[in-house]
Image (spheres, helix red, strand yellow):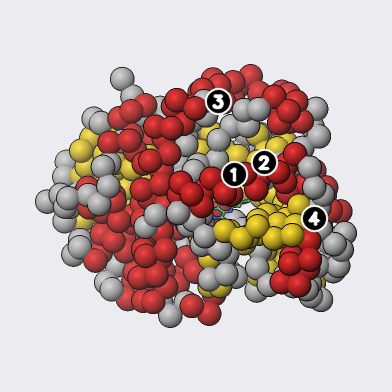
Amino acid sequence: MVKSVLVLGAGMIGVSTAIHLRERGLDVVLVDRKAAGQETSYGNAGLIQREATRPYAFPMNARDLVDVALARNNDVHYSIGALPALAGRLSAYARNSLPGPYGRIVPPWRALIETCLTEHTRFIDATNSWDLVTQGGWRSGFRSEGRDFDAAREDAITRVREDGLSVDIEDSRTLASREPALIRAMAGSIWWKDAWAVSNPGELVARYARHFTAIGGAIAFGDAATLDRTASGWSVRTPDGVLNAEATVVALGPWSDDLAKRLGYSFPLFVKRGYHRHYTCTAMPAIPMLDVEHGVMIAPMQAGLRLTTGAEFLPRDDAPSPVQLDVAERGVREIFALGAGVEATPWLGSRPVMPDMLPNIGAAPRDPSLWFHFGHAHQGFTLGPSSGRLLAELMTGETPFVDPTPYAPARWLD
Ligand SMILES: Cc1cc2nc3c(=O)[nH]c(=O)nc-3n(C[C@H](O)[C@H](O)[C@H](O)COP(=O)(O)OP(=O)(O)OC[C@H]3O[C@@H](n4cnc5c(N)ncnc54)[C@H](O)[C@@H]3O)c2cc1C
């Protein structure tokens, strides 16, 4: 069995993997060019989404597609110029969202989601982090009755019946009494009660990282691009010297394919960019709320009321174009007492997405000492501890708690 590992990337995925490997007695160094939890795992909506039993599919009904095409829907933003480069990946994503393939993707996705609360609980306990966590779920809020709210109610009832979720369908009066911070009446909401909300996602990852060092792990600053093969494994250069290990885990989130390509592996990873900004707010909502009509998640955080946007289909490194956030902010001002923006400019990050909606968790087909762990899309903050456990089990030869085949990186490679 391998004894030493470099884990490249200290987001929720890399940190969780590092803890699981260290718990199994391996010598683990976590390498990042920044402090732990400063990138995508910092900027998300902070939801531990036990209710996300079905991955986020490509919009397939004609009305949604027309809304997206005509830019009538603030969930999605794209530029025509960016689409040709993305066409192959998006059409694979759309094909995988058809009922047949999607039906085969849901069970392995759900197998990871189902363990997210148990696995996070272990880490939250170990880091005394319950002060950051509210076990109160979140709401999809609707301003008006109509087809969207009807469809959401139907979906919620199905998910209760088929996925065993705990959901409350709230009418206007119930919602107003349970969420007194609302300053305008809404038609109602779906309350997804199984989820948890974290008031400072980056801090939670930082605490998990401190726990990793407390149990004997090491953290080093360094650039993953300096990774090299050596006679006995892998090396990476840091300002303090060269680090060597027998195995390497690539957990670089939306940057993972840059390194994978250099190592000879081409993955169809693409990104859905998203923005957030905090605002002062005199009356914070008790739990996060999705303003469905404006495609914005409104989450009470330590830094203020965080508005996070939906998916933007632009290249990862293109300049920010926070048009969705502008629309979102105007909308949220109508329902909550939103004050001034806390930061001068919005945060921009990228969800790392695979066209079959499943993350890559497993060994590189041609290098048994190289492991890939990325592509957790909309739910990487939720999935880190579960997914990290699976990868650690595979690396140490334990019986994995779920069948790892659907997540194997080999599925993309000839
Ligand atoms: C707007 C938005 C809202 C979201 N909301 C939620 C939510 O509510 N719940 C949820 O579960 N998920 C949510 N997500 C998704 C979730 O945030 C991601 O899936 C998750 O953070 C990915 O974690 P990661 O560790 O793979 O990547 P990251 O957190 O990005 O970590 C990758 C790390 O690699 C490092 N790195 C990159 N390149 C190099 C290099 N060359 N050398 C060294 N280090 C390098 C980076 O510094 C970074 O620390 C959201 C995402 C967005 C954008």
Badge 2 marks a residue whose secondary structure is: helix
Q: Earlier in the sequence, mark 1 or mark 3?
A: 3
Select label 3 or label 2 by which is in front.
2
> Does residue 159 lie above or below 49 as drawn?
above
Quarter of the picture holding the C terminus: top left
For disc 4, the neighbor class at 10 Å (few under 14, some 14 to 19, many from 20) is some
Residue 399 pos. (x, y %): 17, 50
Q: Amino acid at mark 4?
A: Ala
Give me the residue at 74% from left, 67% from top: 174
CA gap between label 3 and label 2 equals: 20 Å
Find residue 94 and name its label: 3
CA gap between label 1 and label 3 equals: 20 Å
Q: Amino acid at mark 1?
A: Asp
Q: Is mark 4 within 8 Å of ligand 1?
A: no
Q: Amino acid at mark 2?
A: Ala
Check whether the beta carbons of the residues at disc 1 and disc 2 lie within 8 A of each other.
Answer: yes
Find residue 187 and name its label: 4
Q: Amino acid at mark 3?
A: Ala
Q: Nearer the viewer, residue 383 or 24?
A: 383
Q: Nearer the viewer, residue 302 or 250?
A: 302
Give me the residue at 27% from left, 41% from top: 404
In the picture of the structure, the residue carrying the numbered disc 2 is: 151
Residue 218 image-quadrant placement: bottom left
> Does residue 100 lie above or below 278 as drawn?
above
